[in-house]
Image (cartoon, rainbow, N blue to C red):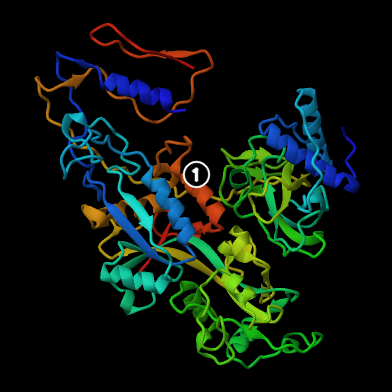
Amino acid sequence: MKLKQLIGAALVAGTLLSGTALTSVAGAAPEPSGWDDVNDAVRGGGSDTTYNFMQRAEVLFNQANGCDTDNATPTVTPNNLGKCLTGASQKATDTAGNWDHDYFFSLFPTGSSAGVSALKLGDVDYARSSRGPSGVGDAPLNFWAFGKDALGIITFGNRTPGNLTLAQLKDIYECRITNWNQIDPSLPSATIEPIGMNSSSGTYATFNTLVGVVANNNSCVKRIGGPTGAFPQENDVKPVINDPLINEDNAIWWMSWAEYRAFDYKRGSAKLWRVEGRDLTTTSVNNSSYPLTRLVYHVTKDPIAPAAPGSSDLTGANGGAQGAVQEFTEFLCKPAAGHTLNNFSGDSNYVELADIYSATGYLRVPAAERTNGICKMETT
Amino acid sequence: MDSPVGPRHATVRSTWVRTVRAVHPRLVRPAHPSGLIGVGVARVARALGALLCGVLVVVVPSPSAGAVDGAGIDPNPIVVTAEQGSATVSVSWSGAVPGKLVFIDICRRSIGDPMFRPSRDCSALGQSTPNGTADGAGVAPHEVFRGQDPAGERWGCYAPDDTAPPGVMKLTTCFVRVTDTSLFNVDADSEVPFGFEGPGRVDPGAGENDGGAAPPPPTLPAVAESATAPVVADAAPSLTPTGDPAPGESIMVAGSAAGSGVSITG
């Protein structure tokens, strides 16, 4: 769709005429912004739950419109290959994408808390998190909620789902309810097998907060491979179902609702229970009538903050990787009106982001919960 | 064309659909008539269309994979009061892959429309996901919104005498879509068109969900003018696409000082 325009632009730009000088555009990076005309490499790390979403968002940002670049074949190093042209050579005008073509990549998941710690240490440039700020330890960071999710309570195999109260869930994980016939007296006697979770996981932390437990600390809570094994990584039921020491008909666990509905391969044979009489639907998550809802976050260092209360325009970093993170955060959080078109589809990047929400199972943050653009910013 | 295909034809019909789509993925699909016609109509029509176009279609024995079939909602049409902004219906289906998660969505466009995309044409806030069943058949309650898409998109499902907010597309026929395994499973989905009956209502709308006004983008500093600096004859055109030229239409670009030029014809 854009080929003719691009060819036309290139040909016009390459036609030089002497004569009366015209004012050109673009002598340096657009301001105010975190851009610096240099392609910065930016590492993200942390949550497994938001890994797929952030990878897709990174690709979208990486390919977004920006400056005209120096494409001259380099003969020495270092060189300016790929960097923004400056001065009169710079003809691009679209500053609503990724001006200096910073490139983002996501490290393999380690868990939200591990990612947040890595960000504080400088091992990553931003963190992925499926839990909110946890206390004064997270004080130098800002948590930007970009999506809404929930925790689905799941069983497997031949277990027919029913309803659980939060009190029953707590009692199961604190080993006071140990048999399925305590949940439903009509059921045959069978020992409940509650499964634990990687303790660095935000999905683990959120479960503990919402249910009021420390799940892994209790003797009846199972690991993979027996009592000396590890707690399973979140959101993938295969290790649980495939463990010969776990009776899948009796096991109970929890996982991200977004991942549950988006990824059949991770969902496997899991089936959702009602909680407090509520089904997990888009409506019950959006209005929080389902009792185990949560937000998911993109985490930055604290200097990256709104330029004004309620604004999605951010400030705090002038270049480098942190400047790139500032611009990427704006990209995630700004309203539809602030986005430019994607070079491949011709659709707005806001619409492309909507497709990513659909593909990964998240809802956008409900309008009533937003604080900055379409995000909600949280601090400790 | 008006008689629905019975359940015993479901397997053959689904095979036709997959074969036709594989051979001719862009076959024009006839629009669903409004009313209670089942899913078989559009798919049989597509298969016949393939034959009429002279496409060799090979019927492959259907594998064990299912195709959601026999989707129905009750009641339909949905009778509402003047105040009602939603209603709960009973959605039934058969033919889903046994044990696989079921997706029920409210959509503005028929699955038979070649432009149908689940992520664009079904409400992000109108979905429920009943657990799969052992025989691939089931029934589940589902809340149907009346009015603007709760996700804030510029369309909605309305009774004939309703008033939609300015800028919101008023649809008096929407679709309950049922599929299994994934929202994006378009190979085995089924739908039921539905409408509302009842006194008209002025829809207050769902509000803007796209974040409203945006702050201005960063600005580019101007470069100081110079009489000797190389310049271009015209400003570079925006990269914002304005649509392809019509077939046969050509664009010309400015000739160079040497008089040569390039013509690109669509």
Give A115 or A275, whichever is nearer the viewer. Answer: A115
Give B235 or A270, whichever is nearer the viewer. Answer: A270
Name the outermost residue toward the top: B259
Give the percent coordinates (x, y) of residue A235. Answer: 55, 69
The residue located at (68%, 60%) in the rendering is B129
Q: Pointer 1: what residue?
A: A351
Give the letter of the chain under mark 1: A
What's the residue type where badge 1 is placed? Val
Give the percent coordinates (x, y) of residue A56. Answer: 46, 52
Q: Residues within 10 Å of mark 1 (few under 14, many from 20)?
A: some
Disc 1 secondary structure class: helix
| Residue B208 located left or right of residue A11 | right
| Residue B238 located left or right of residue A16 | right
Give A367 or A49, whichever is nearer the viewer. Answer: A49
| Residue A316 located left or right of residue B148 | left
Q: Is residue A127 visible?
A: yes
The residue located at (53%, 76%) in the rendering is A232
Give the percent coordinates (x, y) of residue A183. Answer: 72, 86
The residue located at (61%, 69%) in the rendering is A289
The residue located at (67%, 49%) in the rendering is B185
